[in-house]
C-alpha cells in the first residue's frame, strides 16, 4: 500500500501520509500526539536516519517503557526568542569562523529548516503609570540592547531561512499562536504539494503554548535547536502519554488561570516529567483556544514535555478569527483525512488517565516561589502568615512616595503586573480584568502608591480590543498603562521599585509581595528584593493591586474603601461571566489580527534606524560588552576526542532539591559585588549600565561569571545563600567563579551534586554552557528535568543519576571528597558507572546511572557536545557518527 494519499480541496490537490490506510484500527487506539509523531517518521523515512523499525515502534506504541526506545523527529520549524536566540546565533557565527579556520565554506552554516526569532525578552519596566511609558521603555530597550539587535539584524540578512520579528511586536509564544503557526503545512516538494502537521521546537520552555491549537512542539536548549536547524533529527525516547480527562464546567467567576493552577498542582503531584500530557473529554470541546493555550503554556510548570490539545472545530474557528482562512480550510480537511481531528467520538489508549472536574475549580493563586504551590483565594491570608514563619508581623514602616505617605509591612504588594504569555493570550482574562477595573474606578477605588503596576500584553491585538471596548482608560486609571509588548515581569524584567520602597524593604527585612499573571515565580526571579511572588489571573492582579496586600481574605474583607469610607468587597466589583463573553464576541474580531500582523516583520522606527554591515562571517567587535565570539571551538579538530574516566574531581557545589535553571543561570539583575558585576565595572560600566544577565547572554565572560550566581542559591558547602563555595583542599570560602578559576589553573575537574528535579524551569542553555566553561564535567543528581538534562549532554557534561533510593546524604557524602568516575570510556546509553569518593584516605564506592538515554545522546557526549558533532559532519570528518 502506498504511504501517500491525495486530497482535493478548493481546486487544489495535496498529497499526505495516509495514516488511516496504513494502520487501520491501530491508529484509533493511539493518542493524537503519538499520531503526529507517527506521521513525521513515515513521511521522513529514508531507511538511513529513519527506518521501518522507527515506524513500527511508534505504530506499536505500548504506553509504558521499561527502557527508552529512541526515535528520530524532524520538526518543521524552530522558534527562538532573543535571550536564548542571541547566544544560539553567536554559536552559528562561531561555527562559520571555525569552518574558515579549517579551510571550508562558512556559508555551509545556514538553517535548513525555517527559523523565526521574536525579540521579546529584553524590554524592562523602567517607566510605568503614564501614557508614554510604552515608548519610553522601548527607547530605553534600544539604548541598552542596540548591539544585540544589530547582531540579530545582521543574522537576518546573512542567514537564509531565518526571520526576525523585531522588538515591540509581542511575546514569542503569543505571536507563534496567533500568526506564525500553520497547524498544517502545505508546500511544494519535488513538484508535488505536500500537506503535513506543523511541528516546532523552541528556545523557550513555553513553546508548548502552541499545543493549544494542535501543534506538537516543546522547548529545547539552544544547542539542540541549532542541531535541528542544521538538519539533524531531534532524537527522543518514545514518550509515555498521560491522558487528562476534563469533565464538568467552570463555576461562575472561576477562570482559565484558576483551572491551570489546579492542573499544575495535580500533574506535579502525579509526576509527568519527560511524559506527554494529552487533554480529552467532554469539557475540552467547550474550552476556548485561549483557555487551552493557557493550560498548554504551563506544561513546564507541571513538568510535562507537552500539554497537547488535538485539532478540532475550535481550532479551525480560531484560525479563521486570527486571519488564517486558507490554513483553516487546509487544516480541517487534512486533519480529518489523516485521523488527526478530534470530535470526542473515540478515546485512545493512554499510559494512564487522570480526571479533573472543572466544576470543583475555585479562584486561587500559586506561590510564593513555585508555580505548583496552589493556594485557594480564601486561604491565602492564613497561608501567607504561615509561610512568613514569624510569630508576629513586623511593625509597619512609613514611606513617602511622590508626596504621599504610605506604610509598608510584610505582605505589602509592591508589584502588580498583568504580564506573560500565559494569560495575555486570553481575551476573557484581559476583558475581565478591565471590567473589574471599570467597576473599581466607578466605586472610587485607587491603587496605593507603593504598588508598581504594569500591563505588558503578549500581543498588540490586546490593546486594540481593550481600546475598542472603551475599557482601557479604566485600567489606566488604576496605573495599568501598557508598558511593553514583550515578556517583562515574569522573566525578571520588572524594573526598579521606588528607591524609598527598596530602602524600606532592605533596612527592615520586609517580606513584600509581587502578584503577576505569569507562569514563573521562582526565588529572586521577579525582583531580587521581593521574597514572595504569587501567580494569579489578570483579574486578581488588579484586585490585589487595589488591596495593596496579599495577607487579606478577599472573600470576606474589603478590597478597599470608597471616598466616603464605605467598604468595597471583591464580590461588589467582580464582572459577570455573561458580560465578559458578550464583550469578547463583540470586540475580538478578525480585522484586529489582520491589521496587527500584516506588517509585523517591518519593525518600528528604532529597528529601521539600526545600521548593519552585510557579510558572511560576523565582524566581532573586541570592545563589545554584549556580543563576543564564544570559545567552544577553540582548538577544534575534525577528529573525535577520546572519552576518558574522570579522576580527581572536586565538588564545586552541593545543591538540594528543585534547583532551577534560574538558580544555575539567573536572567535578572547583575549583582555589582558578584564576579559578573565586578567584571563589568572593570570595563568602566556603571551599575546603571549593567542591564541583565538575560540581555548579556551573548557575552560568555559575563555569563560564566554569572553561573550559579543567583543570590538565593543554597550550596550546602557554605552556610549562607548566594554564589559562594569552598575551595578544596584548602577549605577556603570564595565566589563560585573564583573557585572554578583556581581549580582550572590546577587542572582539577569539577562535579556538581544535586537532589531531585535538578534543572527545573526554563529551557536555559546557559545553565549548561556556564558550567561547561567553569570546568564542570558531570552532575550527579537524584533526578533531572528533561530539558536541562539534554542541555548538559549537548555541552558535553555527563548527567549521572543516583540509583533508586540513594542520594548524597544516604551515601554519607559531604562534598569535601575527591571523586573518581570509572566506566566512561566507550560509554553507551544508560550505562551504570562506578563512583569512588575519597576522603582522609578512606574510599566510598557507589554506582550511578549515566542519563544518556539514547544512542544519539551518547554520540553527542562522545563528541564533546552537539555543536562539535554537527561541525564535524560539516567538516566532512569520518570521525563523527
Image (cartoon, rainbow, N blue to C red):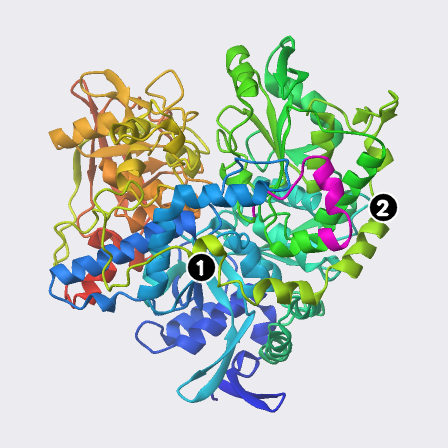
Report the disc number at residue 318: none
Q: For the residue carrying disc 1, how many other residues have a C-alpha within 10 Å: few (<14), some (14-19), or many (20+)?
A: many
Q: Position of residue 500 (x, y in %)?
A: 56, 18
Q: Quadrant of the C terminus?
A: bottom left
| Residue 481 magenta-highlighted | yes
* Residue 834 within the segment the image draws in magenta: no
Please give left or right for residue 17 compared with residue 726 in the image: right
Q: Quadrant of residue 21?
A: bottom right
Q: How far apart are marks 1 and 2 (CA)?
A: 39 Å
* Closer to the eye: label 1 or 2: 2
Q: Residue at x 79, y 60 (%)?
A: 585
Say above or below: 709 vs 612: above
For marks 1 and 2, the one nearer the N-term is 1
Residue 431: horizontal and vertical position, in percent? 74, 49
Decide: is 704 above or below 300: above
SS at badge 2: loop
Q: Nearer the viewer, residue 201 or 23?
A: 201
- Label 1: which residue? 201
Local secondary structure at mark 1: strand
Q: What stretch is highlighted in magenta?
A: 466-484
Decide which of 292, 477 is in the foreground and name it. Answer: 477
User: Residue 875: percent from the left, percent from the top?
Assistant: 17, 65
Classify mark 2: residues with Cα within 10 Å, few (<14), some (14-19) or many (20+): few
Q: Residue 576 carries which label?
A: 2
Q: Residue furthest bottom?
A: 11
Residue 516 position within the rendered picture, expressed as x and y whole percent measured from the top left: 62, 37
Whether residue 844 is visible to the viewer of this picture, yes or no, is: no
Q: Residue visible at 83% across and 49% down? A: 577
Residue 836 can be seen in this image: yes
Which residue is painted at 57% across and 73% down in the image? 27
Residue at position x 59%, y 37% from top? Answer: 372
Q: In which quarter of the image is residue 102?
A: bottom left
Amino acid at each position: 500500500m502506498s504511504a501517500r494519499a491525495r486530497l482535493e480541496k478548493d481546486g487544489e490537490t495535496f498529497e499526505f501520509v495516509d495514516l488511516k490506510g496504513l494502520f487501520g484500527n491501530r491508529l484509533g487506539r493511539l493518542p493524537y500526539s503519538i499520531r503526529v509523531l507517527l506521521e513525521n517518521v513515515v513521511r521522513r523515512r529514508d531507511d538511513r536516519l529513519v527506518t521501518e523499525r522507527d515506524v513500527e515502534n511508534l505504530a506499536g506504541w505500548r504506553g509504558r517503557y521499561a527502557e527508552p526506545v529512541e526515535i528520530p523527529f524532524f520538526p518543521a520549524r524552530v522558534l527562538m526568542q532573543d535571550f536564548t536566540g542571541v547566544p544560539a546565533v553567536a554559536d552559528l557565527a562561531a561555527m562559520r569562523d571555525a569552518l574558515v579556520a579549517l579551510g571550508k565554506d562558512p556559508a555551509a552554516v545556514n538553517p535548513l529548516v525555517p527559523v523565526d526569532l521574536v525579540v521579546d525578552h529584553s524590554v524592562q519596566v523602567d517607566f510605568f503609570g503614564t501614557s508614554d511609558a510604552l515608548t519610553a521603555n522601548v527607547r530605553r530597550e534600544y539604548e541598552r540592547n542596540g548591539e544585540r539587535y544589530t547582531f540579530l539584524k545582521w543574522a537576518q540578512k546573512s542567514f537564509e531561512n531565518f526571520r526576525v520579528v523585531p522588538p515591540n511586536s509581542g511575546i514569542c509564544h503569543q505571536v507563534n499562536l496567533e500568526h506564525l503557526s500553520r497547524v498544517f503545512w502545505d508546500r511544494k516538494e519535488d513538484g508535488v504539494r505536500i500537506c503535513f502537521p506543523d511541528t516546532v521546537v523552541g528556545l523557550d520552555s513555553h513553546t508548548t503554548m502552541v499545543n493549544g491549537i494542535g501543534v506538537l512542539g516543546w522547548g529545547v536548549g539552544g544547542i539542540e535547536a541549532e542541531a535541528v536547524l542544521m538538519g539533524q533529527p531531534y532524537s527522543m525516547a518514545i514518550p509515555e502519554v498521560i491522558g487528562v480527562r476534563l469533565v464538568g464546567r467552570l463555576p461562575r467567576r472561576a477562570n482559565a488561570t484558576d483551572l491551570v493552577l489546579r492542573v499544575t498542582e495535580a500533574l506535579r503531584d502525579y509526576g509527568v516529567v519527560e511524559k506527554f500530557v494529552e487533554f480529552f473529554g467532554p469539557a475540552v470541546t467547550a474550552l476556548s483556544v485561549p483557555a487551552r493555550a493557557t493550560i498548554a503554556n504551563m506544561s513546564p510548570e507541571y513538568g510535562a514535555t507537552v500539554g497537547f490539545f488535538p485539532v478540532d472545530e475550535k481550532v479551525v474557528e480560531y484560525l479563521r478569527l486570527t486571519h488564517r482562512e486558507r490554513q483553516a480550510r487546509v487544516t480541517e480537511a487534512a486533519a480529518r483525512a489523516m485521523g488527526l481531528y478530534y470530535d470526542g467520538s473515540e478515546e485512545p489508549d493512554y499510559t494512564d488517565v487522570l480526571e479533573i472536574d472543572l466544576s470543583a475549580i475555585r479562584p486561587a493563586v500559586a506561590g510564593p516561589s513555585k508555580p505548583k504551590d496552589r493556594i485557594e483565594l480564601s486561604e491565602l491570608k492564613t497561608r501567607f502568615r504561615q509561610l512568613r514563619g514569624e510569630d508576629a508581623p513586623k511593625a509597619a514602616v512609613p514611606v513617602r512616595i511622590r508626596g504621599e505617605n504610605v506604610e509598608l509591612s510584610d505582605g505589602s504588594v509592591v508589584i502588580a503586573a498583568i504580564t506573560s504569555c500565559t494569560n495575555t493570550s486570553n481575551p476573557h482574562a484581559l476583558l475581565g480584568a478591565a471590567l473589574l477595573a471599570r467597576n473599581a474606578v466607578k466605586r472610587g477605588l485607587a491603587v496605593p502608591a507603593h504598588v508598581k503596576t504594569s500591563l505588558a500584553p503578549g500581543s498588540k491585538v490586546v490593546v486594540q480590543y481593550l481600546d475598542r471596548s472603551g475599557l482601557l482608560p479604566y485600567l489606566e486609571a488604576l496605573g495599568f498603562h501598557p508598558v511593553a509588548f514583550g515578556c517583562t515581569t515574569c522573566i525578571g524584567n520588572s524594573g526598579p521599585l521606588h528607591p524609598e520602597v527598596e530602602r524600606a524593604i532592605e533596612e527592615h527585612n520586609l517580606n513584600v509581595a509581587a502578584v503577576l499573571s505569569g507562569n514563573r515565580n521562582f526565588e529572586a526571579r521577579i525582583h531580587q528584593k521581593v521574597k514572595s511572588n504569587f501567580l494569579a489571573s489578570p483579574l486578581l492582579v488588579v484586585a490585589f493591586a487595589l488591596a495593596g496586600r496579599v495577607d487579606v481574605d478577599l472573600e470576606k474583607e474589603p478590597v478597599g474603601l470608597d471616598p466616603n469610607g464605605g467598604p468595597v468587597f471583591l464580590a461588589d466589583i467582580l464582572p459577570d461571566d455573561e458580560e465578559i463573553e458578550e464583550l469578547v464576541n463583540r470586540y475580538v474580531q478578525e480585522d484586529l489580527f489582520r491589521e496587527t500582523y500584516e506588517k509585523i516583520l517591518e519593525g518600528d522606527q528604532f529597528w529601521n534606524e539600526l545600521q548593519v554591515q552585510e557579510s558572511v562571517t560576523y565582524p566581532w567587535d573586541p570592545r563589545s560588552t554584549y556580543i563576543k565570539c564564544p570559545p567552544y571551538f577553540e582548538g577544534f579538530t575534525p577528529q573525535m576526542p577520546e572519552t576518558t574516566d574522570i579522576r580527581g574531581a572536586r565538588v564545586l557545589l552541593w545543591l538540594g532539591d528543585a534547583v532551577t535553571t534560574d538558580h544555575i543561570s539567573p536572567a535578572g539583575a547583575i549583582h555589582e559585588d558578584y564576579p559578573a558585576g565586578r567584571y563589568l565595572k572593570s570595563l568602566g560600566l556603571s551599575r546603571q549600565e549593567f542591564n541583565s544577565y538575560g540581555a548579556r547572554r551573548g557575552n560568555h565572560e559575563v555569563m560564566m561569571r554569572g553561573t550559579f550566581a543567583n543570590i538565593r542559591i543554597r550550596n550546602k558547602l557554605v552556610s549562607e545563600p548566594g554564589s559562594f563555595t569552598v575551595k578544596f583542599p584548602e577549605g577556603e570560602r570564595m565566589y563560585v567563579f573564583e573557585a572554578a578559576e583556581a581549580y582550572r589553573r590546577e587542572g582539577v575537574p569539577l562535579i556538581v551534586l544535586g537532589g531531585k528535579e535538578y534543572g527545573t524551569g526554563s529551557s536555559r542553555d546557559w545553565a549548561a554552557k556556564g558550567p561547561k566553561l567553569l570546568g564542570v564535567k558531570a552532575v550527579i543528581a537524584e533526578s533531572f528535568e528533561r530539558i536541562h538534562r539534554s542541555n548538559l549532554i549537548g555541552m558535553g557534561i555527563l548527567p549521572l543519576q543516583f540509583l533508586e533510593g540513594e542520594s548524597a546524604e544516604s551515601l554519607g557524602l559531604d562534598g569535601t571528597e575527591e571523586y573518581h568516575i570509572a566506566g566512561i570510556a566507550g560509554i553507551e546509553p544508560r550505562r551504570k558507572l562506578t563512583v569512588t569518593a575519597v576522603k582522609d584516605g578512606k574510599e566510598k564506592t557507589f554506582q550511578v546511572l549515566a542519563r544518556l538515554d539514547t544512542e544519539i545522546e551518547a554520540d553527542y557526549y562522545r563528541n564533546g557536545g552537539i555543536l562539535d558533532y554537527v561541525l564535524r559532519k560539516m567538516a566532512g570528518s569520518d570521525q563523527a557518527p
